[in-house]
């Protein structure tokens, strides 16, 4: 059976922790989209790790970690990441990379930087990991699949052809040094050596695994609001962040996905530009940022301070719906223990009218938050293991949000560690 762990919002909801936790009972963990542009932070017995490309199951010796065809694969970064965990005594993980996975090329990273430079103040706030140029090339059909590394004639011919078009842009649009085909080919030969041992026909492997009754976890990156179709376009990422895309980005039949665990954080944070209706500023934001997550809300990949806000029921209800949520994992609830009152965004006011439906981007820019204040619980809830033991105001907060978003909160996370989880039976659960 297949389960997906995905985000309802802008990313950084705590998917890494939930995947690491669920991986204990899974056999295979698959990354199906995105690249090394975002990261998951995981705290376990080996220490604290920031993963960018590797699935969050790499810390268990019984699991296989898979990089699916939907991922933007940066081979040197993957190698570095494998070393970074094995250097810290994590047993060498079993890793498979899809032969249909495409590679982030050195020029994708350069184009990302050059384009942000060219756009100046109008930039998208890219992490400059080459992700947007990578996916543009994939869909323009000039991307490089891992499988192509093993066909020398094809590779040489393609390198020459691609350099021709790239060099026109480098020379005339960006006024930067051109790519030399022989250097690029040499780099790709190095990539071939690095990746050879991991290459696999992933969809066939997964089909066989499912026949054998194995459990597969699909691990999403970012969240619904960064989806190129259903998110806050154009301030989105370049690959679909939805569980449905897990079927495509891993090579699985969609009907195999039986559980969709959507991760929602008990407050909001976002990185990069774009509308963020429940955003807060100044001291209020600084304090939440400082206390947030595990050691502050700063990007796992970039170290950038995250933008902060109150929980947004409108965005989260929409985020959960588009994911096809069966279960909500509600995370980082412990962080809110310092607040006397906790504001929650329950509606958007747009042109004088209040709505609870998440609008298209041009309307979203005009939305003002309608806030409701809930009483805080003013204590530390870390270490609590049953829902009933949580303070009443804390349970009221969870139940209020559950009612607003309309999806069952079956897991409450009250700390960064694997064991910091409270399972709960929800009145909204169908099963
Ligand atoms: P992801 O990309 O969705 O995996 O999220 P990140 O890893 O960027 O951010 C989540 C952060 O919150 C990490 O530092 C986690 O260790 C931390 N975290 C996850 N769940 C909890 C929780 O319940 N409580 C606290 N305090 N921190 C948590």
Image (cartoon, rainbow, N blue to C red):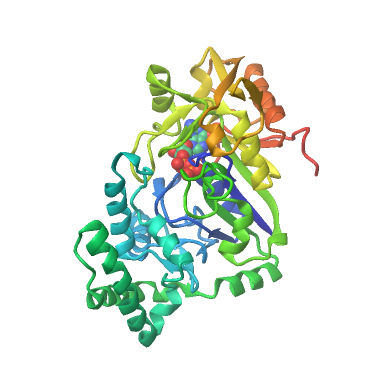
Q: Is residue 73 visible?
A: yes
Residue 351 position, x and y percent, is 59, 23
Q: Which residue is depicted at the point 69% across and 51% down? A: 259
Q: Which residue is depicted at the point 65% across and 45% down? A: 322
Residue 330 position, x and y percent, is 60, 35
Residue 253 versus residue 408: which sits nearer the camera?
Answer: 253
Q: Which residue is depicted at the point 34% across and 77% down? A: 161
Report the label total: 0
Vertical position of residue 232 compared to residue 61: above or below: above
Residue 185 position, x and y percent, is 28, 77
User: Residue 103's quadrant in the figure?
Assistant: bottom left
Relative placement, left or right, of 135 versus 383 is left
User: Residue 264's quadrant in the figure?
Assistant: top right
Vertical position of residue 120 compared to residue 377: above or below: below
**The C terminus lies in quadrant:** top right
Residue 83 versus residue 280: which sits nearer the camera?
Answer: 280
Vertical position of residue 225 compared to residue 111: above or below: above
Relative placement, left or right, of 297 versus 399 is left
Residue 98 position, x and y percent, is 50, 70
Please, which residue is most extreme toward the bottom here? 153
Q: Is residue 92 visible?
A: no
Relative placement, left or right, of 28 versus 424 is left
**The N terminus lies in quadrant:** bottom right
């Amino acid at each position: 059976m297949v389960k997906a762990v995905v985000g309802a919002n802008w990313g950084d909801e705590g998917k890494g922790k939930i995947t690491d936790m669920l991986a204990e009972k899974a056999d295979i963990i698959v990354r199906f989209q995105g690249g090394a542009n975002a990261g998951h932070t995981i705290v376990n017995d080996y220490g604290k790790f920031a993963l960018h490309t590797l699935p969050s199951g790499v810390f268990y010796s019984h699991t296989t970690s898979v990089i699916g065809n939907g991922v933007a694969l940066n081979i040197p970064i993957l190698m570095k990441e494998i070393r970074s965990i094995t250097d810290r005594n994590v047993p060498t993980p079993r890793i498979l990379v899809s032969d249909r996975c495409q590679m982030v090329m050195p020029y994708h990273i350069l184009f990302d930087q050059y384009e942000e430079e060219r756009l100046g103040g109008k930039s998208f706030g890219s992490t400059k990991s080459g992700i947007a140029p990578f996916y543009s090339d994939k869909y323009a059909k000039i991307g490089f699949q891992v499988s192509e590394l093993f066909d020398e004639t094809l590779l040489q011919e393609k390198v020459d052809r691609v350099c021709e078009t790239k060099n026109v842009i480098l020379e005339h649009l960006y006024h930067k040094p051109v790519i030399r085909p022989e250097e690029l080919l040499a780099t790709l030969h190095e990539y071939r050596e690095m990746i050879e041992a991991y290459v696999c026909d992933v969809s066939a492997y997964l089909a066989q695994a499912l026949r054998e009754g194995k459990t597969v976890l699909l691990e999403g990156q970012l969240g619904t609001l960064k989806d190129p179709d259903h998110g806050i376009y154009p301030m989105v990422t370049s690959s679909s962040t939805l569980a449905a895309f897990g079927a495509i980005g891993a090579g699985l039949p969609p009907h195999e996905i039986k559980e969709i665990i959507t991760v929602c954080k008990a407050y909001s944070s976002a990185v990069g530009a774009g509308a963020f209706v429940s955003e807060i500023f100044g001291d209020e934001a600084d304090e939440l940022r400082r206390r947030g997550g595990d050691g502050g809300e700063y990007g796992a990949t970039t170290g950038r301070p995250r933008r902060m806000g109150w929980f947004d029921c409108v965005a989260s209800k929409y985020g959960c719906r588009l994911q096809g949520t069966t279960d909500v994992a509600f995370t980082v609830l412990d962080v809110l223990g310092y607040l006397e009152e906790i504001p929650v965004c329950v509606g958007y006011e747009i042109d004088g009218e209040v709505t609870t439906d998440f609008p298209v981007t041009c309307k979203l820019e005009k939305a003002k938050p309608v806030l409701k204040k809930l009483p805080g619980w003013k204590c530390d809830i870390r270490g609590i293991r049953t829902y009933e033991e949580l303070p009443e105001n804390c349970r009221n907060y969870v139940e209020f949000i559950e009612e607003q978003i309309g999806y069952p909160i079956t897991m409450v996370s009250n700390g960064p560690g694997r064991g910091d989880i409270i399972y709960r039976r929800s009145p909204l659960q169908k099963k």
